[in-house]
Image (spheres, helix red, strand yellow):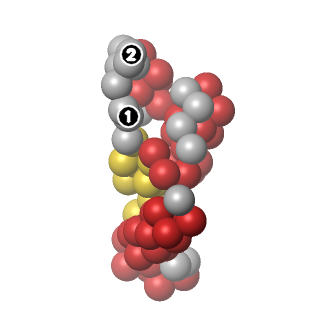
Amino acid sequence: LHDAVRAMPWPVGMRVFAWIGCESATVRRLRAYVRGERGLDARQHLAIGYWRYGMNETSYHDAHNHDRDEDYFRMLREQQERH
């Protein structure tokens, strides 16, 4: 998956938002790519690990709080209020 994402052409001159949802270790690699190499900031991506190899989605969710939607939208509201 990581290689396929890196091989995709990157939009030029457009606003970009990356939504990443997959296995936990893969999320970390893709988040590092969109942040480090593509320069997206926290407002331009949402990356969530939904499971980890060796754990099903329910077990992973119960062990980790990875529901970031609420955190992401709260951050956006706070940033908008500051500007």
Q: Residue furthest right?
A: 36
Q: Residue at x 37, y 79 (%)?
A: 58
Q: Which one is in front, 5 or 17?
A: 17
Q: Please, is residue 54 above or below residue 29 in the view?
A: below
Q: Residue at x 61, y 26 (%)?
A: 37
Q: What residue is pinned by disc 2?
A: 12
Q: Which one is in front, 77 or 29?
A: 77
Q: What residue is pinned by disc 1?
A: 16
Q: Quadrant of the N terminus?
A: top left
Element on which disc 1 rests: loop
* The disc label shown at residue 78, or none: none
Q: Are there few (<14), some (14-19), or many (20+) residues within 10 Å of tag 2?
A: few
Q: Is residue 20 left or right of residue 36?
A: left
The kind of residue on which mark 2 rests is Val
Q: CA distance from mark 1 to mark 2?
A: 9 Å
Q: Please, is residue 60 above or below residue 28 in the view?
A: below
In the image, residue 63 lies at what x, y percent? 54, 81
